[in-house]
Structure formats: C-alpha cells, structure tokens
Amino acid sequence: MPKIVKLMQGNEACTAGALAAGLRFYAGYPITPSTEIAELCAEELPKVGGKFIQMEDEIGSVAAIIGASLAGKKAMTATSGPGFSLMQECIGYASLCEIPIVIVNVQRMGPSTGMPTSPAQADVMQARWGTHGDHPVIVLAPGNVRECFELTLRAFDLSEKYRVPVIVLTDEVIGHMREKVELPDPAEVHPLRRAMPAAPAGYKPYAADPNGGVPLMAPFGEGYRWHCTGLFHDESGAPSNKGEVADRLLRRLMLKIENNVADISDYASEGIEDCELAVVTFGSSAMSSLSVVRRLRKEGVKAGLLRLKTLWPFPEAAVRELAARAKTIYVPEMNLGQLALEVERVVAGRSRVVRIGKVTGELFRPEEIYNAIMGAK
Amino acid sequence: MSNTLSYFRQERLPHIWCPGCGHGTVTGALVRAIERLGLDKNKICVVSGIGCSSRAVGYLDFDTLHTAHGRALAFATGIKLARPELKVIVMTGDGDCTAIGGNHFIHAARRNIGITTIVMNNEIYGMTSGQYSPMTPKGMLGTTAPYGNAERSFDLCELAKSSGATFVGRATSYHVPLLIDLIEKALSNNGFSVVEALTQCPTYLGRKNKIGGAVEMLEWIKNQTINAKAAAALPPEKREGKLLIGELHNAPAPEFAGEYGELIHTVQRNFANMKGGLWECASNSD
Amino acid sequence: MRVEFRLSGSGGQGLLLAGIVLAEAAILEGKNAVQTQSYGPEARGGSSKAEVVVSGEDIDYPKATDPDFLLALTADAYRTYGRLQGKGLIIVDASVPLDPEIKARTIPLPILDTAANVVGKKVVANIVALGVLGGVSGVVAPATLEKAVLNRVPKGTEELNLKALRAGIELASRAGGKVQA
C-alpha cells in the first residue's frame, strides 16, 4: 500500500497515529475541541476489531483505558481542559502502577469552562504535575498536523517501553486545522509490540530487570494472577507501608524517565546553529514563531527557533546548549508563562529570557511575536 | 473436602480487617461460589476501589486490581469490554459504590455489562473511621453524624434494578448459605449482577451506636431482614421497616460486551472491501 | 507563492466545506495547503469564517495574515472582514449593500442568486462561491476543482454540485477573473 497523502485535521491525524500504533480500545467523554477523536475512534475501531466506549465522565474514561491496557489492549482517551482535570487522579494511578496509556489533551482556554472553542497552551504544568505526588510522565507536543500522527504513534511506543502514561498535548488550532499530510505506508510502520514476561511461575510484576530496564507487564487473563494496586507495593505487587519499599519504588519510577531523557527528548529547530536571538516554544505557537524567525533571517538578524516536541521530560540539554549561543531567548506561549519557567530554570541566567504570553484565546499573529522581539531587543 | 484456601494468596494472610468484621465472611462466600461453579482461576479478574471492602482483592489468587476510590466499575468496564471472555467481579463497599462511585454504578447497570458486583454494605466508612455513608440509616450515629444521620439512605437493590441490572439479590453476613447461592447466581448471569451483602462493622457502626460486638450486630442484622419470598405472603404491617433478602430481580437481557462484539462482526462484514478509511493506518499494528 | 483566502458568511452556508475542497484541490495539484476555521457556535448559526492558505512552498503560519481574496456572503461578514482587508480583493455577494468606508478593491457577484435561481438550490451557494474563488484566483485548475468537489459531496448530488461549481467559474470569468487553463 502506498503512503497516504491527504488533507487531514489534527484530531484526525492523532487518531490515525493511534491506529497505526495499535490502538484497540478507546474510552472517552465528549468535550470540545477534542471530540473528533472520539467520533473517529467510534467509527474506525470496530473495523479493526477494536472497542469504543463513551463513558459517563472523564474519570471513567481514563479508568476504563487503564483496565483495557491491563487486559492487553493498547488504549487511549482524548479530552480537553475540564476533562483533563478530572483525569488527574487516575493518571497518578497509571504512573504508580506502571500501566501504559495515552491521553490526548487538545488544550482550550481555561481555567474552568473558560472559552471552550478557543486555543490555549496553559496545561504545560498540569500535564507534568497535575496529579498528586512525585510521579513519572511523558508529554509530547505536536507542532503541526503531521506530527499529530507521528507523535501519537510515538506516544504509544514510549508508553509501552517505559510503562508510563504519555500525554499528547495539542491545542484547538492544531486539533482543528487541516493540512496536507503525507503519512507513511502503513506496512512500513512498526509499532512497539508489548512483550510477554516469562512463564507465570515466580512472576514479579514490579521487579526491574537486572539491566535496570522496565519490568514486563503480563496481561490479565493469561495465568499470571498478579495484584495491581495504587498503594505503594513491593516487587511482587503486594501493598506495603514500609518506607524503604516506597522509596525504592518511587526512585525507580522517576529514574526510568530521568535516565532515558536522551531517548525520549525530541525537538525541531531552524537556524539555531549560529543564532544570537532564539525563540523557544512548542505546538501551534511555533507555527507563528517560525514565520517570525524566517522574517528576521531575511532582515539579516541571526534568529533561530527551537521547537520542543517533548515537553516532559524537559529537553534541558538542547535549551542549555542554546543558551550558550543566544544572548536572548524569547518564549512565546498561549499562557502567562509556563514553559518559560522551565527555560528560565535551565538557562539559569546565561541568556536573557523574555516571556511573550498571549491569553486572548487566539493563535499568535506573527507580527505580535515580531513586535515583542523588536520591542525587547 | 473444600479447597477454598487454594483461592487465596495465603502468603498475604492474615487480612487487615478488624476482629469481628463481616467482610471476610463475604469474601469467603465469593470464593465458595466460584468453587461451586468450577470457574477457571486464570480467567477471573477481581476489581475493587478504596475502603475496607476493597482490600479483599489483595488476598485472592486471581488477577486482581485495587483501583481508585469509586472507580472499580469503570476500570472493570475497560477490562470486560477489552476481553469479554474474562469473568469480571467487582468487590466494593457502600461508600465506594453508592457515593463516590454512584455514577459508574448506575451506568454499568444501564449498559448491562457482564460484571458481578458485590457490595459489602456495613453502612459506614470504616477505613476512615466511622463517617456516615449514603447507606447509613437515618438517625444513626457516625463521626460526621454526631447528632444522628439527617440524610435518607439508598435502597441499593432498587437502585440497581431501576438502573438496568439484570440480576439483583441481597443477603447478609448472617445468612451465609443464601449469600453463596446469590453470588453463584450472580456469577452465572451473563449481564450486570448486583449482590448486596449487609455486613457488620462492630468497630465503628456497632460501637458508635451501642449495638454491641460482632455477635450482637449479626443478631441486629438478622432482625432487620425478612426473606423476600416469605414477605410476599405477609401483610404490609409485618414487612414495615424490614429489609428484603433473597433474589430480588432476575431478568436476563443481552450483555453489553457481547453486543459490542456483534456490532464489530457486522461492521467488519460491511467494510470488508472498503478502502480509504483511517483504519488502513492500522494494517500493521495488530 | 503564498495565496491566502478568507471565506466568510453565516453558519450553515457551508463555507467550511468550500474551504476544505479548495485546499484539497490544491493538494491534488501537488501544492501545500492549510485550512483553518473559527470554530464553535457558528456551526449552529451566526457568523462563520474559514481560511485557506495555498503555497508551493512550506507553510509556516497557518492563518491568513493579509488575505489575497476575501469572500463575504453576508452584510455582517462583509462589514467585519472587509474593514480588515488590505491589498487583497473582496468578492461580495451582490445582495450586500457596499460600504464606502471599505476601500479594498471589491467585486459584487450574484452568488446566492445564482445558486437559488440558476442552479436551482440555495444550499449549493458554497460550491458556487468555490467556483468563483477558484476562477478569480486561478490557484487551481477547474478540472482539479471538479475532481475535489466530487471527492467530497454526498452521493447523488454530484451533478448538482458540478453545475454549481461551473456556474461559479462562469461568474468569475464574466467578472474578468483569470481562469487557469
């Protein structure tokens, strides 16, 4: 089968990426601007023998996909601000219990009901820290429609590889815009398949393998008869109140991400090799920013763009390297300074960091970023 | 000779429940019903939420899932729909099931998804030490009802029935043979089944309301109940204030996960030769 | 060359579909295209806006910055977006009274009337408009537009929609639009 070239909506591309990754279970609750993903999953999943269910709320949705993942299916939900808030407790559950799930959050203006049909990028911190307690999580941020496909596909692979919830953070602009997309020949896509652990006898669901790798998860119903609990647990899965057990587990959970930042971290760039002025951003703000960086280059300004495709774990190395060159780093984002907090932390005074926030519920117009840069230069 | 213990993770025993608690009796009844039916241990999945009741699953030698407060049925829905061939059982309590998890309960019942739900109703939040629940009878004392519970309580079985459950029964930790029978029937029903098991909490409900210890509480429970069949022959004044026990509703109907499987067959037949959908992206991802 | 379109009118006029078809036609010719819209209650009435950017090169910013072509099918849309119009052309439905305050070059064309009375169905005004935009801009060939329309419209309405498209292209050519060969 040849590659697929078509005009595709961002939400549609997320669905296509999920299907290519092996999505076979979707549970969700309708919410603008993510609903197209649910509608498409309802339509497409039965064709490939997959299951779709519209749950009674977003808490039920994330709970159901965790259940389905435990039963051996690749599972996803999609939502937006209010629904994402409701999902937080169970995201923590999946983090602690190491259950692979993918959550697409098509961001809209908040807090609260906010502006349901308007874009924002203000869930950067919630995506990382929304649930209580220290916990591992991976957050990817597509910067265009094609990346909705690529990064949703990758989200499943990372989720399986590290047994961690992965959040695909898009926004209303990318979710709803249609763009020419070239998708790979489906036969050429090789998603990560979940490996079965060794025989049930002696199976320890939370025993890290000797190389420090992530333990394999046995699907329910295959004779492993293991216990999965949101209480802190030992390697056998048994709940434990012992401080040293909790300490060992939580450190392992955090390290499985921290030790693999190089594998997980991903970004795109233009003109950063020799830049004196850099823009660091993500998602739809990067589309406006790219146009500005190209304009500045034409005007003879050595401008560069670093567009983060992984938000968490934060690609510290790339930003630190950039800070060695760029005198000033501009951080445009559709919020009042969230990514900028991380950039400031990593840059640690080596470059000047200028926040450019927009909260009108609209995508940045390029001249807004251009003028902000010129005004701050 | 019963082989009941073989269904337990014996290395995890003894359990954490208080002396005199009725939850062990209910857990034992479940295991006996499973044994009677000769179900395959490897194809049983028991799911719970949070609370005293929800600790039961940790002791059972099946695939077991101890989830978030109130969400057991939502997790279980994911498992059952993903793998309809599994026997999915939810063990929950009155607070877990009827307060924080109430919405999932009515929707699981509405769908008639093949899950057997056993509600251990001790009429109190035990794990957090004695607050009133939606099942605490009006007027009774709890730590958050120091002057007597001002709220009305649910009739859980009526709720289950009107929400669409296809098998509903009630027994108590006193009426153990009945409880085993009901759980056996519930497990045999291909659909959403609910068994309410009234159990004693001597530590909180009993002490706070001066009912006494476990034995007095069992007596107290026994005296509140009346068998549904016997009640049918009694005049209304004799039934007044009594809780019906026994099989209360049995109306088989098509089960959701199975129906969805049928939907898949139909769709796949209709789309077998269709080209161009997003589903083509999935061609290498089975 | 980046060409920007803004299609405005009222919800239910099908301008989003017109924008999608225009973008798909551009893709059929190997160009890049991005389509965006104002999203929300407009779909259930009220003002509506869709935008299409077509380019032979990479498209960074997805929205129209200074539309080369503004289509306005209602007085409301004409006043709102006409005022923002810079160097580009305005194509306004002939039923809309012109506003002397709006200085951009403007061509009034009987799009709604053509749909209702020439093609015979009010609902195809969006496809008439698509023909007009395709014709006036010359950004895609008429044959490609026809193919793109056929890919999108419901079965059984192909003839009607082709008739509407051709009527739109005809309106454009009478208005002196550059129709691509």
Image: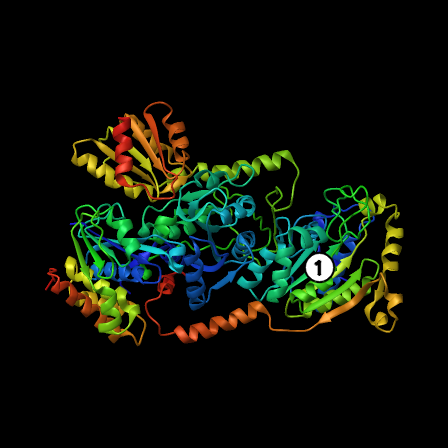
User: Residue B201: x and y, percent?
Assistant: 80, 49
Between B75 and B110, the one nearer to me in the picture: B110
Q: Residue shown at 88%/52% (left/top)?
A: B215
Q: Residue at label 1? A: B118
Q: Position of residue A306 (x, y in %)?
A: 30, 37
Disc 1 is placed on an element classified as: strand
| Residue A42 shows in this picture | yes
* Image quarter in which the C terminus of chain C is found: bottom left
Viewer-proximal residue, A233 or B215? B215
Q: Is residue C140 above or below residue A299?
A: below
> What coloring was used for the rendering?
rainbow
x and y percentages locating residue B11 in the rendered image: 70, 48
Tag 1: residue type?
Ile
Residue B38 can be seen in this image = no
Which quadrant of the figure has residue A219? bottom right
Q: Which chain's residue wears label 1? A: B
Q: Position of B32 compared to B254: left or right?
A: right
Q: Is residue B24 left or right of residue C92?
A: right
On the image, the x and y values in percent for residue C162 come to 22, 72
